Amino acid sequence: MGRTSMDSLMKRADSKYSLVVATARRARMLTDGDEPLVEGVSVDSIKSVTIAMKEIAAGKINIIACEGGIK
């Protein structure tokens, strides 16, 4: 499997911070047992963070920014 470029990921998020938070949350969901949304990957053979980044780059995960910020 090829690497997911930062450019393709940044097209899906408004900041690197929101991208990192979304990736971490999705990776935790995968670790806790959710099935991957992209074809041909398995949590057993690929790290959950890598799968989460592939899902975001493929547009399977939408990143919604908080309007008021995080407090």
Image (tube, rainbow, N blue to C red):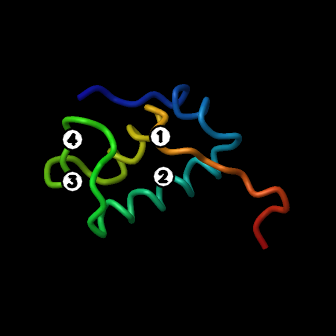
Indicate which disc, 2 or 3, sits on the residue closer to the N terminus. Answer: 2
Q: Residues within 10 Å of mark 2 (few under 14, many from 20)?
A: many
Q: Residues within 10 Å of mark 1 (few under 14, many from 20)?
A: many
Q: Position of residue 66 (x, y in %)?
A: 75, 57
Amino acid of disc 2: Thr
Q: CA distance from mark 1 to mark 3?
A: 16 Å
Tell me the element at label 4. loop
Residue drawn where x is 58% and y is 47% of the image: 19
Q: CA distance from mark 4 to mark 1?
A: 14 Å
Q: Position of residue 41 (x, y in %)?
A: 21, 41
Residue that mark 1 sits on: 56
Amino acid of disc 3: Val
Image quadrant occupied by the N terminus: top left
Tell me the element at label 3. loop
Q: Which mark is residue 41?
A: 4
Mark 4 and mark 2 in contact? Answer it, CB < 8 Å. Answer: no
Mark 1 and mark 2 in contact? Answer it, CB < 8 Å. Answer: yes
Mark 4 and mark 1 in contact? Answer it, CB < 8 Å. Answer: no
Indicate which disc, 4 or 2, sits on the residue closer to the N terminus. Answer: 2
Q: CA distance from mark 4 to mark 2?
A: 16 Å
Q: Residue furthest right?
A: 68
Q: Residues within 10 Å of mark 4 (few under 14, many from 20)?
A: some
Q: Which mark is residue 65?
A: none
Indicate which disc, 4 or 1, sits on the residue closer to the N terminus. Answer: 4
Mark 3 and mark 4 in contact? Answer it, CB < 8 Å. Answer: yes
Q: Position of residue 52 (x, y in %)?
A: 39, 48
Residue drawn where x is 39% and y is 58% of the image: 27
Q: Residue furthest left?
A: 45
